[in-house]
Amino acid sequence: MSAARIGRLTIGIAIVASLSAAQAQVPPHQPGTICFTPNFWCWLAYPQYPGSPCACQSPYGLVRGVAG
């Protein structure tokens, strides 16, 4: 196997692994029932339209996010 092919294969595996890890952190849900912040997510008390603004409680106060 050539060095270029090994490099492309390594990059491809890294991309797939990073996408899988992000997807695995969010449980199956109905659209609009989870608020996504830049660093974490939380369940919403009431469903909202996907894409609408929302907030999650953190130890340091509210963190703004987007319903999804």
Image (cartoon, grey):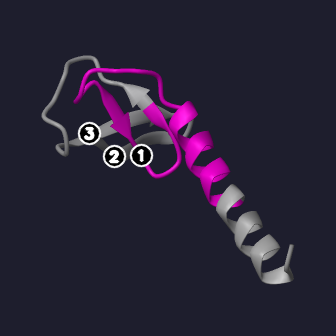
Which SS class for mark 1?
Answer: loop
Mark-to-mark CA distance, 2 and 3 = 5 Å
Q: Is residue 26 left or right of residue 51?
A: right
Residue 50 at what x, y percent from top left? 18, 38
Give 25 or 39, whichever is nearer the viewer.
Answer: 25
Q: Residue at x 40, y 21 (%)?
A: 28
Please rate how many residues cluster around mark 3, counting C-alpha atoms within 10 Å: few if below 14, some from 14 to 19, many from 20. Answer: many
Instruction: Give the quarter of the image for residue 53.
Output: top left
**Would you place residue 45 above or below residue 7 in this image?**
above
Please rate how many residues cluster around mark 1, counting C-alpha atoms within 10 Å: few if below 14, some from 14 to 19, many from 20. Answer: some
Which SS class for mark 2?
Answer: strand
| Amino acid type, mark 3 | Cys
**Would you place residue 37 above or below residue 59 in this image?**
below
| Amino acid type, mark 2 | Gly
Q: Residue at x 16, y 29 (%)?
A: 48
**Residue ranking furthest to the left:** 49
| Amino acid type, mark 1 | Thr
Please rate how many residues cluster around mark 2, counting C-alpha atoms within 10 Å: few if below 14, some from 14 to 19, many from 20. Answer: many
**Residue ranking furthest to the front:** 1
Q: Residue at x 45, y 35 (%)?
A: 41
Q: Is residue 18 left or right of residue 65?
A: right
N-term-proximal mark, 3 vs 1? 1
Give the extent of the magenta segment.
14-41
Q: Which mark is residue 14?
A: none
Q: Is residue 25 magenta?
A: yes
N-term-proximal mark, 2 vs 3? 3
Mark-to-mark CA distance, 2 and 1 = 4 Å
Is there CB contact under 8 Å for labels 2 and 1? yes
Dot 1 corresponds to which residue?
Answer: 37
Dot 2 corresponds to which residue?
Answer: 65
Residue 32 at what x, y percent from top left? 22, 29
